[in-house]
Amino acid sequence: MLSYKVCNGTFDDCVKKVKEVISKLGLEIFGIVDHANNARRVGLNLDPTVVIYFGNPRVGTLLMQINREIAYELPLRILVWESNGVNYVGYKKPSRIAEEYGLSNNEIALKIDAVMENIISSI
């Protein structure tokens, strides 16, 4: 289940805000997947939907050193989407993801939770 909030402004403004906050925190953006654009390329319609992949390689590596399988979930991601004219930003809590890999109450994952909440609350 995603944690999410409404983002005011246009869809493009929301994506821009997320990217700016990520960069201001010193995190690296690894990629952006525009699902709506991909849908259009194959003749389908989809409301604006973008996933931003980002993180800090040092922090991610510390988690992978504990359990390499968590690499499947990295880098971190934030979903920005529009539904019925309303824009949202959402993410899955890293601590919940870590629990799936036997890392319950992991200090690193809990700190990443705080970073993710900081990003979302800054939008």
Image (tube, rainbow, N blue to C red):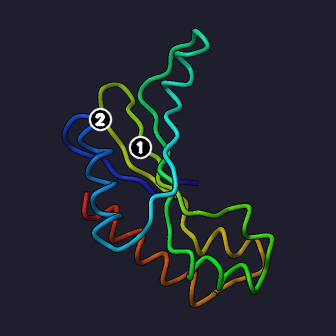
Residue type marked 1: Val
Q: Which residue shows up at 32% across the image and 38% down it?
A: 87
Left or right, residue 81 beside residue 106: left
Q: Secondary structure at mark 2?
A: helix
Left or right, residue 96 beside residue 116: right
**Residue 87 vs residue 63, the one in the foreground:** 63
| Mark 2 neighbour class, 10 Å CA radius: few under 14, some 14 to 19, many 20 or more | many
64 lies above or below 117: below
Q: Which residue shows up at 55% across the image and 60% down it?
A: 92
x and y, in percent, of residue 17 in the image:
26, 52
Residue that extends furthest to the top in the rendered view of this protein: 43
| Mark 1 neighbour class, 10 Å CA radius: few under 14, some 14 to 19, many 20 or more | many
Q: CA distance from mark 1 to mark 2?
A: 8 Å
106 lies above or below 70: below
Cβ atoms at labels 1 and 2 below 8 Å apart: yes
Upstream in the sequence, badge 1 or badge 2?
Answer: 2
As drawn, the label of residue 80 is 1
Residue type marked 2: Phe
